[in-house]
Image (tube, rainbow, N blue to C red):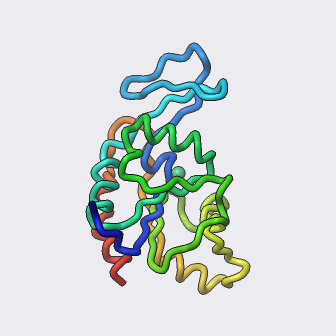
Amino acid sequence: MTTKSGKTVFVDCNDTLIAVRYANRNDTAPEGYRSIERDGQHYHVQARPSALAFVQALAEDGHDVVVLTGGSTRIQYLLLSLGGLNREIDEVIGFENSGKTEIPQNWVLVDDLQGGSTSFDEKLGMLGISRKRLGDKKYDELIAKRCIQCSSFKGGEDAHPLTGLLDDVRAKLAA
Ligand SMILES: [Mg+2]
């Protein structure tokens, strides 16, 4: 049992921890993907090869690992389970329970999206952070201090493993 450090690593789900494709009923999952159906929607899912080691290392550091996703909490949790990633994850925050989260004192966000994109602003909005309220300067400073962009994982080769970001995550949490 790890002692929680009071530090939280928010991690994006799609294209960060897993690659997921919407599929039709009769589509065969491409090699390396697993197939699942929920509520009539079919998905093909592949865990990023470096994802498990990444979240395990963060859990071993004693940090809370919270998946922050624009998708549905239930579906994303299911997709993470399918990728074998659910065990090390403390919570999944999707659009339904966004805004109900208390932001911890010390946190970072790892996401394949970058600052400046609307979806990324929406993601920070889920944590109650808005550019409008903070002003451009503080908002950009907060992104530089708290956010780490990873490369998008679309399946197949994991050319830029998430584990390569561990030092940066640790440095930001220690700052
Ligand atoms: Mg993403």
Q: Residue at x 57, y 53 (%)?
A: 69
Residue 116 seen: no
Q: Is residue 125 left or right of residue 92?
A: right
For the residue pair 21 and 93, the one nearer the viewer reads as 93
Image location (x, y in percent) of residue 38: 60, 28
Image location (x, y in percent) of residue 75: 58, 39
| Quarter occupied by the N terminus | bottom left
| Quarter occupied by the C terminus | bottom left
Image location (x, y in percent) of residue 94: 61, 53
- Compared to 138, does 10 lie above or below? above
User: Given the current orientation, which residue lies at the most extreme right position?
Assistant: 132
Q: Is residue 86 left or right of residue 157?
A: right
Q: Residue at x 39, y 39 (%)?
A: 47
User: Given the current orientation, which residue lies at the most extreme front position?
Assistant: 1
Q: Residue at x 43, y 39 (%)?
A: 81
- Residue 127, by quadrant, is bottom right
- Compared to 155, does 55 lie above or below? below
Q: How many marks?
A: 0
Residue 14 seen: yes
